[in-house]
Image (spheres, rainbow, N blue to C red):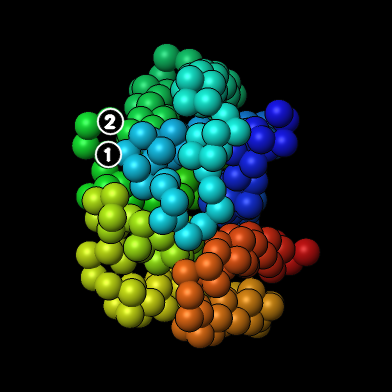
Amino acid sequence: MIKNWIEAFRLRTLPLALSCIGMGSFLAAYFGEFNLAVCILSLTTTLFLQILSNLANDYGDSIHGADSEHREGPQRSVQRGSISSKAMFNSIIVFVILSFTSGILLLHYAVGIGSTTFYVFLGFGLAAIAAAIAYTNGKRPYGYSGLGDISVLIFFGLLGVCGTYFLHAESFEPFILLPAISCGFFATGVLNVNNIRDIKSDKLAGKNSIPVRIGKQKALRYHIALISLGCLSTIIFLVFQDKIRSIFLLAPAFFFFGKHLQEMMQADSSSKFDPQLKQLSLSTLLFVVLFGLSILGL
């Protein structure tokens, strides 16, 4: 039973969730604004939100038929019957509560209850919860309209990184938009790998993801652009910050990104795309860790 729930949590997606918080926190430390309580609570809240999203996607795709016998990736929990749809629905409610509670604690320590900033970020938090659920649920799930990429870019990139930085510093530094864009593009890349893998089953289920809309070959070119521009964005940030040495310290991450792109282009079946989800998630986390250590001089 516990094993079934751990599989439903999809732990291999969690490094990606940690990356945007790590990037925002490293940037806060670089600019002398780091707050340990904000870092810990940001990580906790984001992990709850990511698990909520995974559970909601499992439930929603099963309801809408995207998880069927035609699916190329690992079978989802509701699809294979290891977790009932009712139990999955109840778990979604639990993680909504956990995400909301953790988010309130985060805002309490970061900006204080009742401030204008508190209500702005409360709105962001509620939007994140709604986005996690509405991706594959409801009458018109936005993931079925090809809007998932934009959502991921915002929540795992711009809002995830810049929002974390702001909660540390209670101020905004425009240059952090560049590494925020990097995290957003890498996260969008992970979603794109998932959608390329599932292109056949998604098409049958009426899920009009970007790969379904533009086709596999163009989706692969789109993927190369996401990873390349993600790397370039942070390189530009480091150049502006006169941190040229840090670019070379990112070489291991660049190597794994290159290896990932090569394997993506060589994959000749949908099943061969599945391992690339974990590889890209871990490569992104490595990129963030190396970035943070290099700019802090550790």
Closest to the observer, 168 or 58: 58
Q: Identify the residue shown where x is 47% and y is 46%.
A: 160
Q: Secondary structure at mark 2?
A: loop
Q: Quadrant of residue 226?
A: bottom left
Which quadrant would the C terminus be assigned to in this image? bottom right
Does residue 282 appear left or right of residue 220 in this picture?
right
Amino acid on which the number 2 mark rests in the picture: Gly
Q: Identify the residue shown where x is 40% and y is 73%.
A: 223
* Furthest residue in direction front, as rendered: 69
Q: Identify the residue shown where x is 39% and y is 41%.
A: 61
Confirm or deny contact between disc 1 and disc 2 (CB under 8 A). yes
Q: Secondary structure at mark 1?
A: loop
Closest to the observer, 66 or 225: 66
Q: Quadrant of residue 134?
A: top left
How would you rate the neighbour count of disc 1 (Cα within 10 Å): few for under 14, some for 14-19, many for 20 or more? many
- Residue 233's tag is none
Amino acid on which the number 1 mark rests in the picture: Pro
Q: Quadrant of residue 115?
A: top left
Asked if residue 16 can be seen in this view, the reply is yes
| Residue 170: percent from left, percent from top | 48, 37
How would you rate the neighbour count of disc 2 (Cα within 10 Å): few for under 14, some for 14-19, many for 20 or more? few
- Residue 138's tag is 2
| Residue 158: percent from left, percent from top | 40, 51
| Residue 222: percent from left, percent from top | 34, 74
Does residue 189 appear left or right of residue 252 in this picture?
left
- Against 172, residue 114 (above or below) is above
Rounded to the nearest whole Å, what is the CA distance between mark 1 and mark 2? Answer: 6 Å
Q: Which residue is mark 1?
A: 141
